[in-house]
Image (tube, helix red, strand yellow):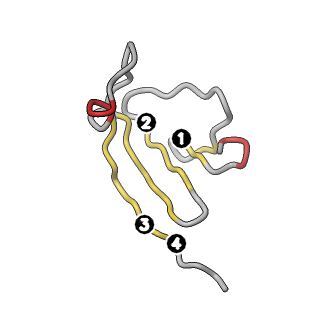
Amino acid sequence: MCDLGAVKVNGYIAKPGREINSGDLVEISFWNRQIKLEVLVIPQANVSRDQAGQLYNVLEQYFKEREL
């Protein structure tokens, strides 16, 4: 995704390997939707699927209209 320029961190296009910190704003553009989130916590170890949702806060999410 980063190689395609589809990920931004704090408004700048992110390169693969970009470190993410607490408080960063991440925008991800998929072909049919866009999501903007705030990173709340960077875990020190692996977390369960149930805990993963507590690591970020979704600020915006919308679906793009399909072009014919």
- Mark 2 → mark 1, Cα distance in angstroms: 7 Å
Instruction: Please provide percent x and percent y for residue 38.
Output: 37, 41
Q: Are marks 2 and 3 in contact (CB under 8 Å)?
A: no
Q: Are marks 2 and 1 in contact (CB under 8 Å)?
A: yes
Give the residue number, with chain letter if any, for mark 1. 9
- Mark 1 → mark 3, Cα distance in angstroms: 18 Å
- Mark 2 → mark 3, Cα distance in angstroms: 20 Å
Q: Are marks 4 and 3 in contact (CB under 8 Å)?
A: yes
- Mark 4 → mark 1, Cα distance in angstroms: 20 Å
Give the residue number, with chain letter if any, for mark 3. 62
Instruction: Please provide percent x and percent y for residue 52.
Output: 33, 33
Q: Are marks 1 and 3 in contact (CB under 8 Å)?
A: no
Q: Nearer the viewer, mark 2 or mark 4?
A: 4
At a point 38% along the width and 13% down the height, the residue shown is: 44
Give the residue number, with chain letter if any, for mark 4. 64
Name which residue type carries label 4. Answer: Lys
Q: Give the mark, 4 or 1, whose residue is nearer the N terminus.
A: 1
Relative horizontal placement of residue 37, taking residue 68 as reference (left or right): left
